[in-house]
Amino acid sequence: ECACDADRTPKLPGSTETAASFEFSNEDHTFGNALRYIIMKNPDVEFCGYTIPHPSEAKMNLRIQTYDEVNVYDVLEKGLEDLVELCDVVTEKFAAARDRFVG
């Protein structure tokens, strides 16, 4: 099952299949900027940006616009998968460096 299906990642009003805004709860700039960066590396993406509507609310809105009828859910899913893979690589490299330092 896609981690970014409509029931789990709500789209904000006015969204289409190629241009949508998603709301993430309990997320901030750390996740928002990392995901924006990864998604913008996708050549099918025309625009990706995020906002934190208000500092007192734990919400992050992500906007994705794609080229040529590419589905935004597919782009979001790939972005999330790519970000997880990147984090796994960073974790492995950190653990290896720590082990060399300690060992």
Image (spheres, rainbow, N blue to C red):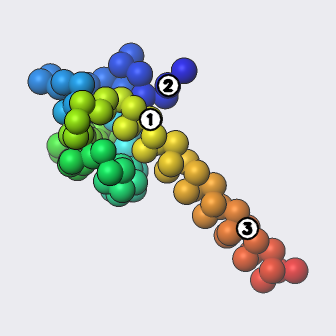
Inter-mark Cα distance, 3 to 1: 27 Å
Q: Secondary structure at mark 3?
A: helix
Mark 2: few/some/many CA within 10 Å (<14, 14-19, 20+) = few
Does residue 53 lie above or below 87 as drawn? Answer: above
Residue 90 image-quadrant placement: bottom right
Q: Amino acid at mark 3?
A: Ala
Q: Indicate the quadrant containing the C terminus: top left, top right, bottom left or bottom right.
A: bottom right
Mark 1: few/some/many CA within 10 Å (<14, 14-19, 20+) = some
Residue 86 seen: yes
Q: Residue at x 36, y 29 (%)?
A: 73
Q: Residue at x 18, y 45 (%)?
A: 54
Does residue 65 lie above or below 12 as drawn? Answer: below
Q: Indicate the quadrant containing the N terminus: top left, top right, bottom left or bottom right.
A: top right
Q: State the residue lying farthest toward the bottom.
A: 101
Q: Residue at x 24, y 39 (%)?
A: 66
* Residue receiving disc 2: 2
Q: Between disc 1 and disc 2, whose residue precedes?
A: 2
**Camera-side residue of 71 and 61:** 71
Q: Between disc 3 and disc 1, whose residue precedes?
A: 1
Q: Amino acid at mark 1?
A: Glu
Q: Amino acid at mark 2?
A: Cys
Inter-mark Cα distance, 2 to 3: 29 Å
Q: Secondary structure at mark 2?
A: loop
User: Residue 29: where, in percent of width, then height?
Assistant: 32, 54
* Residue receiving disc 1: 77
